[in-house]
Image: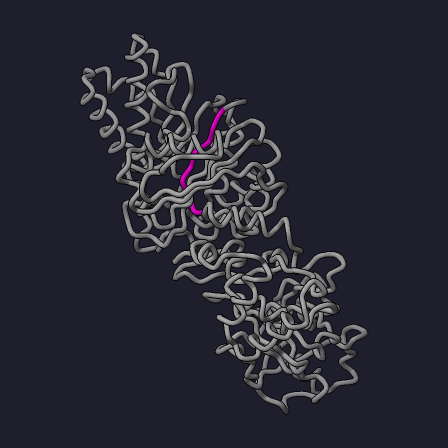
């Protein structure tokens, strides 16, 4: 789902931006009256109600007047796209009225707006447009599955960063970035999921390979939009040029009391020097001298978190890394749970039933097996020979149509009864930690080698760690700090855990801890005592409790 609920979502996926936020974005991008905007090209790719287009037009005209040039010189300096014709008419009127308010003749204002405004699809036109100096705005939020199939396919073919279940804003980023001339800048406010999610990996790779991130301003608490939407937005300023220092900031509702110029000036000062005087109320900022590379997630939700995270990443080891002996994986995906999961212990041959732990079995911090089984088509050597298990064969045969409809069965018709994932039988008997894939906080739960995980559970096991001691670290507020940085936040404040993020959690090597620390973590885990686990973790990671509390935030 896109970041706006369907009943709140504006037509064509537009979520309208408040004026103070739009002004801040223009200031951060350098689209200012003092600059020579007349000889530049600025683009607003999805104008909506004109939250960006109106102030861009005003700034352009004021820049022109400041240079004492003819207003006709502005005709080719701005390109405003709106896909909806009715919205375009309202937008045209709003821009013209704003120019008349500056003292322009109605005739001149109308002529300029006519030269600037295009009713059409920016994503379709972008490859043929001239290179731009500024591309600014708030791209629409529409999941591809909510669009007609032909349009979605055309976008995917043209914009290769649109991976998986990407939102259309990914294509807007790619189109804008590719349209920039050297030195040009793209500044958007958008949901920050692409910075963390798998579907944003190709876009992150594109950015880090050819562009420089200048600013990331988290605005989760900033009341940035005209309607109340379930959004976790951030401003990103990305320039076509080499990567340099990045200002990482957060702004809340108090920040709007300051002028956009004061906010931008403060952020630019932090980026330039790394130091600053008192910041405007509601604004926090720090400078990152190095940025992420490749398609690595950007866990930069606030400056305090980024500073602490970078220190921990430098001093400690990934949870799963070469030589640690620790593995993070996910439970079995079947492709047809209705067939492969049962509560009937007599359904097929007993050897073909594997005790299966479900996400709900971990509620309360203890594993309480609900009696579910996997109707298991695997042996340690591979798929079973159905001729050796007549009850299993008969059961699968009754459900052949459902099993054959799966993608995995169509690809391997001779193995039509296989689950998507192969069962790792050695995992069953291991002591291991389960972590549900969606939760408000990380809650590791111990399995003493009695069950196998369903695909809604992540599983952690280790040859080096006492898994109960490791569970104590993950249970602590420090463990929560890592998942708050890396995990994707969903509607309602829940975190979506993924193996790629769990693997990046930093931990000490077990032999770097004292026996007392190991025992203390294990005891805290067994008691499900987060406070005791946190006290030990703060000492192990050398973190001040006040700093951690500030980094975790509300």
- Is residue 185 on the magenta stretch? yes
**How far from the left and from the top, in percent, is residue 357?**
59, 78
Residue plotted at (36% across, 54% down) = 230
Q: Is the image coloured rainbow, by chain, by secondary structure, or in one colour?
A: one colour
Residue 122 in the magenta stretch? The answer is: no
- The structure residue drawn at horizontal position 65% and vertical position 68%, both measured from the top left corner, is 460
Main secondary-structure element of the magenta-colored stretch: strand
Outermost right residue: 381
Quick check: 329 left or right of 552? right
Q: Nearer the viewer, residue 206 or 20?
A: 20
Task: Determine the image quadrant of residue 379.
Answer: bottom right
Counting from the top left corner in percent of width and height, residue 352 is at 70, 83
The quadrant of the picture occupied by the C terminus is bottom left
Residue numbers of the magenta segment: 184-192
Quarter of the image for the N terminus: give it.
bottom left
- Above-or-below relation of 218 to 482: above
Whether 541 is drawn above or below 59: the answer is below
Residue 331 visible in the shown view: no
Q: Which of 361 and 442 is in front in this view?
A: 442
Tell me where residue 116 appears, x and y as whole percent: 34, 22
């Amino acid at each position: 789902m896109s970041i706006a609920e369907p009943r709140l979502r504006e037509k064509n996926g537009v979520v309208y931006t408040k004026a103070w936020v739009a002004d801040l974005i223009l200031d951060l991008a350098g689209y200012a009256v003092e600059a020579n905007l007349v000889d530049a090209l600025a683009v607003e790719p999805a104008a909506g109600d004109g939250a960006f287009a109106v102030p861009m037009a005003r700034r352009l005209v004021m820049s022109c007047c400041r240079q004492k040039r003819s207003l006709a010189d502005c005709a080719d300096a701005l390109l405003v796209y709106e896909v909806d014709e009715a919205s375009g008419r309202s937008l045209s009127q709003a821009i013209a009225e704003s120019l008349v308010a500056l003292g322009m003749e109605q005739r001149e204002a109308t002529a300029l707006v006519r030269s600037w405004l295009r009713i059409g699809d920016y994503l379709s036109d972008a490859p043929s447009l001239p290179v731009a100096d500024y591309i600014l705005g708030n791209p629409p939020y529409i999941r591809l599955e909510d669009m007609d199939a032909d349009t979605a396919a055309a976008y995917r073919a043209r914009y290769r960063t649109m991976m998986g279940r990407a939102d259309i804003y990914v294509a807007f980023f790619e189109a804008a970035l590719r349209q920039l001339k050297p030195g040009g800048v793209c500044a958007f406010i958008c949901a920050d999921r692409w910075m963390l999610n798998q579907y944003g990996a190709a876009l992150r790779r594109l950015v880090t390979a050819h562009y420089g991130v200048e600013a990331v301003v988290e605005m989760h608490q900033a009341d940035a939009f005209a309607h109340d939407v379930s959004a976790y937005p951030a401003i990103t300023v990305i320039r076509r040029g080499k990567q340099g220092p990045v200002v990482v900031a957060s702004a809340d509702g108090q920040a709007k009391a300051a002028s956009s110029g004061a906010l931008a000036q403060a952020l630019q000062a932090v980026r330039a020097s790394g130091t600053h005087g008192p910041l405007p109320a509601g604004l926090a900022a720090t400078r990152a001298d190095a940025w992420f590379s490749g398609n690595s997630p950007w866990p930069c939700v606030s400056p305090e978190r980024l500073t602490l995270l970078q220190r921990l990443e430098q001093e400690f080891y990934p949870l799963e890394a070469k030589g640690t002996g620790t593995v993070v994986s996910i439970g079995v995906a079947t492709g047809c749970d209705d067939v492969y999961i049962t509560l009937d212990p007599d359904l097929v041959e007993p050897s073909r039933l594997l005790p299966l732990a479900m996400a709900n079995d971990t509620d309360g911090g203890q594993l309480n097996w609900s009696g579910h089984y996997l109707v298991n088509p695997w042996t340690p050597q591979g798929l079973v020979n159905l001729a050796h298990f007549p009850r299993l064969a008969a059961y699968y045969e009754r459900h052949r149509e459902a099993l054959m409809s799966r993608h995995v069965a169509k690809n391997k018709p001779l193995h039509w009864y296989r689950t998507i994932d192969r069962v790792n039988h050695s995992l069953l008997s291991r002591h291991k930690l389960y972590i549900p894939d969606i939760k408000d906080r990380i809650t590791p739960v111990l399995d003493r080698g009695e069950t196998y995980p369903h695909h809604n559970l992540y599983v952690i096991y280790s040859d080096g760690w006492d898994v109960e001691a490791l569970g104590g670290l993950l249970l602590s507020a420090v463990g929560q700090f890592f998942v708050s940085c890396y995990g994707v936040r969903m509607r309602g404040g829940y975190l979506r855990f993924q193996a790629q993020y769990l693997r990046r959690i930093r931990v000490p090597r077990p032999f770097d801890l004292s026996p007392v620390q190991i025992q203390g973590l294990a005891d805290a885990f067994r008691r499900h005592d987060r406070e005791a686990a946190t006290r030990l973790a703060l000492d192990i990671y050398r973190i001040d409790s006040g700093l951690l509390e500030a980094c975790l935030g509300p």
